[in-house]
């Protein structure tokens, strides 16, 4: 086994040797053809993601007698999310149905139930709470806290996020991550889509651990319909791309770094990217925080999400005029050094030459005349 | 089933290829054999290797099998009644290997004679990178068949795009064949177009891919009604797992 194997762009599992990189893996390719012409009537979530409409609220209602299904909130690589009401409590919740093929995977189901139990234990203001989970019919499902608001992706689409808001989001994400990491849970798919913001500006991390939960356990046990299950390449730490099964919480810190960069600049830190302060007017000390979170080697990154939070809060609480103004100062000096000084020297040399040339006949005071003579040259 | 609309790979069904083998026209037979080989020989070779045949022996057996197909009347009875071409071919090969083993000592059929230039060096290379797990010879055959089929389908699709001077678009969107993988905004930027245009282009690419895939599989089936089953079988051959209907 080589350390780096290209992975399927769709499901994230390693590609067979010799498979063209960039092309989805054979499983995903066949899966895309399955049921394409005849999606089974009322068979629930099956077939390819885009080919089938999500099951209607009416069709799944019988599966969840304790819930009143109110409508579809969204649909993604992992499944469909419905708005629902718990009849007993009168509380509105988000019901997440995972794609059926995931449910047909016995080992996966077992692991899903095991991991979901851990997730249901997570209790933190910055993490979307899991109220219930299980299997019904062919579906694995999660009943989660309903967050009324938007996600960071939508917010980013609507326009640049104010640096102040970006910092508030990041510190809240750090708080949620730190708590989960202490509980031994790694998110593995931190990205703007999974960061929700409610009406009060409170941040909640969604789909905690779902990436791991839906991830194949071994090379013989692979999942095809999970879609984004293994993380989202643009936000994944280098080690997560190489050894998806062996990452620790520091992979989340890298992903947080990518999100941080994107929140500040509106761009992804791809290739040789510029520090954020080169792109937007922010405290240059933030560059150091973002870059350290984005270190390729996990050992060089922040080791705890709380460290990122502390540094950001320090910067927010101790604004320093000097560092913020530094780039401008430096650039003024730069222009002085590059343009003004040589110009001045040229002027001096010319003036000296003219002085020498004319000096034989004219005395010092006539030097003023050097100016029109020089410009005439 | 209409296949005329498909340039390249699947102009003829596999079953009609078998028929042309015995059609009497030697040139047509030869062409049919070569097309048949292109699709089938590596999976059969891998099967023989996984069965424990040494490199030389597997090479010999694969050549010999195709000699048989061409020269003997073995396949005369290979009509469409036999169902799936994939299964039929493996059964025929297994039969051939059994006969060959029985004829141990006598000159092996096909031995020493080369009728097709099969790139066995390349085959052994491919076999060398097959996962050395517990896959049975049959499992390996099915997987190699399935992957070969996909390779041809994607190559045909790529050729179609190339023919319309859209090769670049195809390569940019190849990752989206099985569904959205890369953010549309990213693709739009790469292609210098709008997200809406990317969405439409990816949708078209996927529709065409599915069409070609299903057609390629239909070509190997006697009964078109078996399409979904065969698709599932291939999906499982490459490690996929379908939802069981309760």
Image (cartoon, coloured by chain):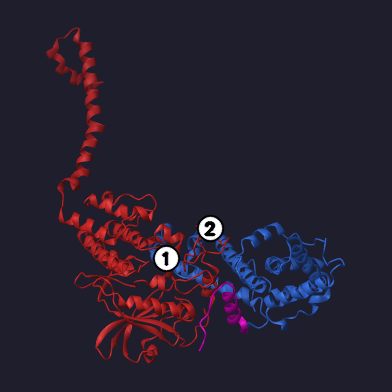
Chain colours: A red, B blue
Residue B180 in the image: x percent, y percent? 44, 69
- Evaluate whether residue A69 shows in this view: yes
Q: Which residues are magenta?
A: B225-246
Q: Which mark is drawn over residue A53? A: none
Q: Is residue B82 left or right of residue B172?
A: right
Name the residue at the right extreme.
Answer: B106
Q: Distance between the Cα atoms at labels 1 and 2?
A: 38 Å
Q: Is residue B185 above or below residue A352?
A: below
- On whether residue B244 falls in the magenta region, the answer is yes
Can you say which quadrant of the picture contains the N terminus of chain B?
bottom right
Instruction: State which quadrant residue B162 falls in.
Output: bottom right
Q: Indicate the quadrant where residue A138 lies.
A: bottom left
- Whether residue A105 is visible, yes or no, is no
Compared across the picture, whether A22 is left or right of A329 comes to right
- Label 2: element kind: loop
Q: Chain of mark 2?
A: A
Up the image or down, A279 lies above or below A33; here it is above
- Residue B197 numbered mark, or none: 1
Q: Is residue A126 above or below residue A296?
A: below
Q: Is residue A184 left or right of residue B229?
A: left
The disc placed on residue A2 is 2
To which quarter of the image does residue A342 belong?
top left
Mark 1–mark 2 CB contact (< 8 Å): no
Camera-nearest residue between A55 and A211: A211
Assess disc 1: are there few (<14), some (14-19) or many (≥20) residues with their C-alpha within 10 Å of its C-alpha: some
Q: Residue at x 46, y 61 (%)?
A: A243
- B83 part of magenta stretch: no
């Amino acid at each position: 086994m080589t350390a780096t194997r290209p992975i399927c762009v769709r499901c994230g599992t390693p590609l067979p040797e010799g498979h063209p990189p960039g092309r989805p893996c054979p499983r995903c390719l066949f899966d895309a053809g399955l049921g394409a012409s005849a999606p089974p009537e009322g068979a629930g979530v099956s077939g390819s993601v885009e080919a089938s409409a999500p099951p209607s609220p009416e069709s799944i209602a019988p599966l969840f007698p304790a819930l009143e299904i109110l409508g579809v909130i969204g649909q993604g690589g992992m499944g469909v999310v419905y708005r629902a009401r718990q009849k007993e409590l009168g509380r509105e919740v988000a019901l997440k149905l995972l794609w059926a093929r995931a449910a047909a995977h016995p080992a996966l189901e077992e692991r899903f139930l095991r991991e979901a139990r851990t997730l249901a234990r997570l209790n933190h203001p910055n993490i979307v709470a899991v109220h219930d989970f299980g299997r019904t019919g062919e579906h694995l499902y999660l009943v989660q806290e309903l967050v009324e608001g938007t996600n960071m992706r939508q917010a980013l689409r609507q326009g640049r996020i104010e640096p102040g808001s970006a910092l508030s989001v990041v510190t809240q994400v750090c708080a949620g991550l730190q708590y989960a990491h202490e509980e031994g849970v790694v998110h593995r798919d931190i990205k703007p889509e999974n960061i929700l913001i409610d009406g009060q500006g409170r941040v909640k991390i969604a789909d905690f651990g779902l990436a791991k939960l839906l991830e194949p356990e071994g090379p013989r046990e692979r999942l095809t319909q999970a879609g984004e299950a293994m993380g989202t390449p643009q936000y994944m730490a280098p080690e997560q791309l190489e050894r998806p099964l062996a990452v620790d919480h520091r992979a989340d810190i890298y992903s947080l770094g990518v999100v941080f960069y994107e929140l500040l600049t509106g761009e992804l830190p791809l290739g040789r990217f510029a520090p954020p302060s080169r792109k937007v007017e922010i405290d240059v000390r933030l560059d150091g925080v973002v870059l350290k979170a984005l270190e390729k080697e996990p050992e060089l990154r922040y080791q705890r999400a709380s460290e990122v939070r502390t540094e950001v809060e320090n910067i927010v609480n101790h604004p320093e005029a000097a560092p913020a103004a530094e780039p401008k100062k430096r650039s003024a000096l730069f222009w002085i050094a590059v343009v003004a000084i040589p110009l001045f020297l040229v002027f001096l040399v010319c003036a000296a030459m003219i002085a020498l040339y004319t000096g034989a006949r004219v005395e010092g005071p006539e030097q003023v005349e050097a100016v029109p003579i020089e410009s005439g040259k | 089933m209409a296949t005329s609309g498909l340039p390249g790979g699947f102009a003829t069904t596999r079953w009609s290829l078998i028929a042309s083998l015995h059609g009497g026209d030697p040139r047509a037979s030869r062409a049919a054999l070569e097309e048949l080989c292109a699709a089938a020989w590596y999976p059969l070779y891998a099967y023989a290797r996984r069965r424990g045949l040494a490199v030389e022996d597997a090479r010999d057996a694969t050549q010999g099998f195709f000699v048989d197909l061409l020269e003997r009347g073995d396949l005369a009875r290979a009509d469409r009644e036999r169902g799936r071409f994939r299964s039929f071919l493996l059964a025929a090969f297994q039969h051939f290997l059994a006969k060959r083993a029985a004829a141990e000592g006598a000159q092996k059929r096909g031995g020493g004679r080369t009728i097709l230039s099969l790139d066995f060096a390349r085959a052994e290379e491919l076999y060398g990178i097959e996962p050395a797990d517990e896959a049975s010879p049959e499992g390996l055959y099915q997987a190699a068949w399935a992957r070969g089929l996909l390779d041809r389908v994607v190559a045909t699709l790529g050729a179609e795009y190339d023919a319309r001077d859209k090769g670049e678009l195809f390569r940019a969107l190849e990752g989206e064949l099985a569904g959205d993988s890369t953010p549309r905004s990213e693709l739009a930027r790469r292609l210098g177009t709008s997200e809406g245009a990317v969405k439409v282009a990816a949708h078209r690419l996927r529709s065409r891919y599915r069409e070609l895939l299903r057609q390629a599989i239909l070509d190997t089936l006697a009964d078109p009604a078996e399409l979904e089953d065969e698709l599932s079988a291939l999906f499982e051959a490459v490690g996929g797992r379908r939802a069981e209907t309760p």
